[in-house]
Amino acid sequence: MNKKKQLAKNTIIIFFGKVCTQLISFLLLPLYTAYLKTSEYGIVDLIQTYVTLLVPIITLELEMSIFRWLIDSRGKEKDTDKLISNNFYVLLLSLTIFSILFFIVTLFVDIPFKYIILIDIIVCVLSGNFLQISRGLGKIMDFSISCILTGLTTVLSNIFLIVFLHMQAEGMIISMALANFICAAYLFIKLKLYKRINFKLIDHKLLKEMYKYSIPLVPNGISWWIVNVSDRSIISIVLGATANGFYAISNKFPTIISSLTGIFNLSWSESASLHINSKDRDEFFSDITNTIIKLFSSLGVGMIACMPFVFPIMINSKYNEAYMYIPPLVLATVFNVLICLYSQIYLAKKMSKQVASTTIMGAIINILLNIIFIRYIGLYAAALSTTISYLIMAVYRHFDLKKYVNIKLEKSLILQMIIIYSIAISAYYINNIYLNIISLMMACFYSFIINKDFLYKSIKTVKNKLKK
């Protein structure tokens, strides 16, 4: 199977698994906004934010190393068992140390829902690690099934705990923990990881090599956390939990694009690692980059054009203020597509330090802009600081990566994006029904024109498959 077909196949399989989780999370918005106060939703969102921060610190991003090393060890069972055994040894040690430190901290700091949060963090670490192992082993179908189970568990437990037991914020946190536990348990059993663990295979030299790769990704992960969600901490401190609730809802829509980016990234990271030394590498990477930018820029402008019609249906009227901050956040996620594409090429070359340094730069810019402007323009400061920091990161990585891989972007594409996004965002804020309809029609036309070659090839491939 050629490189593009393998990438497409893996993306489709992962898509059906991950989209279940993400779509369910999105469809639960009416439930959350109906049963939770803005302040409650803001608090839960902040807790999720800090869980996201802690996980890479606890693991030192070892799951990224295990994925990368497992790709190289495919077909070598002894090497695979050795990698998984060393991974588990460190994982158990890290979780034990963290749990002890957590209990010490809670003696001096009052943390709401502390025991549920601790369990949530532990199962998040396990599920994240096992998901990377399944990818490293090439078990993409198991990866997708585990994501589907996560999504189903999330929706059922949320409905039961929030609607019937009226547990509100606590119910949401329990649902997250339960969903991650189901994911981890399924993969542990299905991949038969218990048969691969042998602590006699502990190799400190191997662990040193893996940590040399993963540790630079820790500041990278923290910086991504800062770029993505430090806004919420600053908002909570300066503007309060209610404002953070509005901002969290604004982020839910662009998160759809981020989630799809993440889905593609999972298969792209494998393809990039497998083909980083291919002779046609530059052509392959350029082709994929341009295709993905076209697809995701279409998705972004389509979302902005659709939002005047979708938002009132999906979101309770008490969250109406959230409507104002969606366009800059959508634009930020489109820039993030390019950032993520380039990130995987860096990692394929095992240049994790470069990934970390560029992300740290973006984090610093984001924080400074946030702090300077939040008292003057409120939540717009958070949205715009994210957009600007993402744009700077994307531009910097593009030119920096040219030292190692020559990726060529279609110049006309940039101009087209500037024009169509200007029209869509203008119509969005004017918020006239006729202008919104025209904007939506233009977004559809733009999307069809720039993606017609991709659509034609996809339809042709599907027809050939059906004939066979």
Image (cartoon, helix red, strand yellow):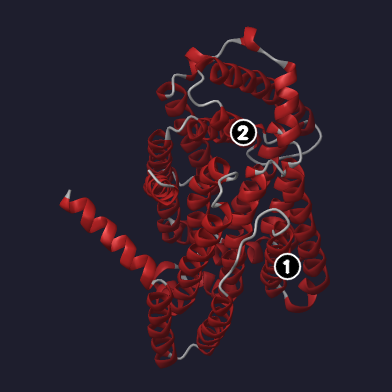
Q: Residue 297's x, y, as percent?
A: 51, 70
**Looking at the picture, how far across and down is residue 143, in whole percent?**
43, 36
Residue 187 appears at what percent x and percent y?
Answer: 45, 28
Residue 328 on image: x %, y %: 61, 73
In the depicted view, which residue is nearer to us: 151 or 400?
400
272 left or right, relative to 462: right
- Residue farthest toward the top in the current orientation of the protein: 200
| Residue 446 seen by the camera | yes
Give the residue number, with chain letter if any, for mark 2: 63
Q: Secondary structure at mark 2?
A: helix
Seen from the viewer's position, the closer of residues 354 and 151 is: 354
> In the figure, is residue 207 to the left or right of 35?
right
Residue type at mark 2?
Glu
- The quarter holding residue 406 reads bottom right
Figure check: 436 above or below 187: below
Q: Amino acid at mark 1?
A: Ile
